[in-house]
Every structure is written in structure tokens, then in C-alpha cells.
Image (cartoon, rainbow, N blue to C red):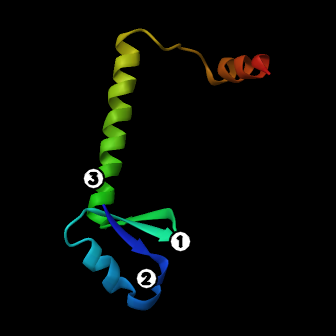
Amino acid sequence: MTQLTANDLKTRGIAAIEAALEHDTEAVVSVRGNQRYVVMELAHYHYLRECELEAALAETRADLAAGRFSQETPEEHVAGLLAEQ
């Protein structure tokens, strides 16, 4: 993954990001030597977000298939949460 410094961004701006993303899908921005941020093209972000949602859906389907769920009214659910406190 390409490394950018805050100073790179300060002096070169968006050109530094574009150059970093020419060969990688993500670039790490470091501030005072500490990795702090990741930049990427918006299309790649949307792809990663879709992967997260697909994983959550698969986990939910597995829970349903294994019977790891309960059916209750909203009132029953809230009462159960309050009882746990």
C-alpha cells in the first residue's frame, strides 16, 4: 500500500493522492509518522461497502438457518432489554 505524508498532501494536494492511487487501490496517510487515514477512489469504497453488506447478509441467513433468533413484539424486546440492566 502506498504511503503518503501529511506534508505530501500539503505541498502537492490532490495530485499526491492521484499519483498514489495509480498503482494501488488504497493509500495510507501518515501524520507525524503515525498512520492515520486511508484514501481510495469512491468506486473502491462502494465495492468494499457492498462486501460488508453481503457478509452481514450471509451471517444473518446462517443465524436464521441455525435457529439463532427469537420472535417477539417490540414491547417484549424492550422489556427483555430493561430486565437485563
Dot 2 or dot 3: first in sequence order is 2
- Front residue of this view, candidates 40 and 57: 40
3 or 1: mark nearer the eye: 1
Q: Position of residue 10 (x, y in %)?
A: 47, 87
User: Mark 3: which amino acid?
Assistant: Tyr
In whole angstroms, how far apart are the C-alphas of marks 3 and 1? 27 Å
Q: Is residue 56 left or right of residue 75?
A: left
Position above or below: 67 against 49: above
Position above or below: 84 against 54: above
Q: Which residue is mark 1?
A: 31
- Tell me the residue at 26%/71% (across/down): 21
Q: Which residue is mark 2?
A: 9
Verify CB contact (< 8 Å) between mark 3 and mark 1.
no
User: Mark 1: which amino acid?
Assistant: Val
User: Label 2: how many residues lie within 10 Å, few (<14), some (14-19) or many (20+)?
Assistant: some
Q: Quadrant of residue 41?
A: bottom left
SS at circle 2: helix
Q: Position of residue 22 (x, y in %)?
A: 20, 73
- Tell me the residue at 77%/22% (across/down): 82
- Front residue of this view, candidates 42 and 14: 14
Q: Position of residue 76 (x, y in %)?
A: 67, 17
Dot 2 or dot 1: first in sequence order is 2
User: Mark 2: which amino acid?
Assistant: Leu
Q: Quadrant of the C terminus?
A: top right
Q: Which residue is mark 3?
A: 47
